Image (cartoon, helix red, strand yellow):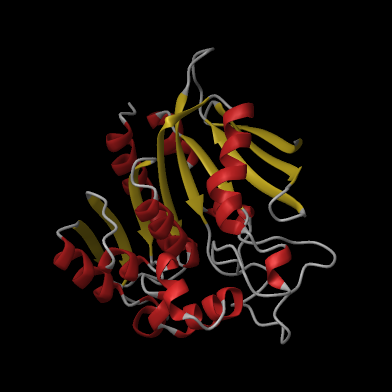
């Protein structure tokens, strides 16, 4: 693992790192904020998964999470959203919603994407092992959150690993990719035409099929340009109601899909996570 940069912030260190990934067969970059802490201490970890077109840099530069993480004693990890590099296949038409920057947090089964697009295993297995080895992380105290496509990733990973993640939240998530254009394109392209195989990567379908967590927190901008066609939070509300999952769905008047929205409510989410992680 190579340290690309390190900057002091709020008494802690914001780092960016690069390593050769066995899962994606590419170099992968990610960022980690480690708050100030006593020597030898092990700290809870919040994972943040980013959305379409993003890298680790978007939330790192615009998410405004460091002050809260420093106060709450939280490590904040932000992976990339897809493999990158020479030879990595992309959308043939160069569209933003498939291929580079749009890994959708699945392990692709369809050629040529199955070679490199293994973001599910990267985020749930390979990168956690690196974090365990190189950072003062208490991996028995983890939570996960994300935005848009990353909100989809956070919800599906959290629902499939309820014993690992003590809290799950999202900003403007794609809650039912099997029912919207973004998800149909991505899941079809990466996983093939069998919609039954999509269900384990669809939060609403997972809940319908029996996946359970005690509660979820979702913030959604009411002025989000993707709200009605791609995000559909009402589908998550209905699924949670039917399953008895406590969903806090905050519809934020006037807010859009951008990091102006995310940064406005980031501290609320981190405090919510900290309370469930037993952080101070």
Q: Quadrant of residue 3?
A: top right
**Residue at x 34%, y 50% (from the top left corner):** 168
Left or right of residue 122, residue 208 in this image: left
61 relative to 94 in the view: left or right: left
Residue 266 location (% of width, % of height): 39, 50
Name, please, the residue furthest toward the right: 86
Q: Position of residue 231 (x, y in %)?
A: 38, 76
Name the quarter where the C terminus is drawn.
Answer: top left
Look at 59% across and 39% down and name the residue there. 32
3 or 11: nearer the viewer: 3
Image coordinates for residue 218, horizontal then vertical, percent: 30, 60
Q: Kindly tell me whether residue 60 is visible in this rendering.
A: no
Along the line of sight, the residue nearer the viewer: 247 or 8: 247
Question: Hey, which quadrant is residue 243 in on the image?
Answer: bottom left
**Whether residue 221 can be seen here:** yes
Relative side of 255 to 102, left or right: left
């Amino acid at each position: 693992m190579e340290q690309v940069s390190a900057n002091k912030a709020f008494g802690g260190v914001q780092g960016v790192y690069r390593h050769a990934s066995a899962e994606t067969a590419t170099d992968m970059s990610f960022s980690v904020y480690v708050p100030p802490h006593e020597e030898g201490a092990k700290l809870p970890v919040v994972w943040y998964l980013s959305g379409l077109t993003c890298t680790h840099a978007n939330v790192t530069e615009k998410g405004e999470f460091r002050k809260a993480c420093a106060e709450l004693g939280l490590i904040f990890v932000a992976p990339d959203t897809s493999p990158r590099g020479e030879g990595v296949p992309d959308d043939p038409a160069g569209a933003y919603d498939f291929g580079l920057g749009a890994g959708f947090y699945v392990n692709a089964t369809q050629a040529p994407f199955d070679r490199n697009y293994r973001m599910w295993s990267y985020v749930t297995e390979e990168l956690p092992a690196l974090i365990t080895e190189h950072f003062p992380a208490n991996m028995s105290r983890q939570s996960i959150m994300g935005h848009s496509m990353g909100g989809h990733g956070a919800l599906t990973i959290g629902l499939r690993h309820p014993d690992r993640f003590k809290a799950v939240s999202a900003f403007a998530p794609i809650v039912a990719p099997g029912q919207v254009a973004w998800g149909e394109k991505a899941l079809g392209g990466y996983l093939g035409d069998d919609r039954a195989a999509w269900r384990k990567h669809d939060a609403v379908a997972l809940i319908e099929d029996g996946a359970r967590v005690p509660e979820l927190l979702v913030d959604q901008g009411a002025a989000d340009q993707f709200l009605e066609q791609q995000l559909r939070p009402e589908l998550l509300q209905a699924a949670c109601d039917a399953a008895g999952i406590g969903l806090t769905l905050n519809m934020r008047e006037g807010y859009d899909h951008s990091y102006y929205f995310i940064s406005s409510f980031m501290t609320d989410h981190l405090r919510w996570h900290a309370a469930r992680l037993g952080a101070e």
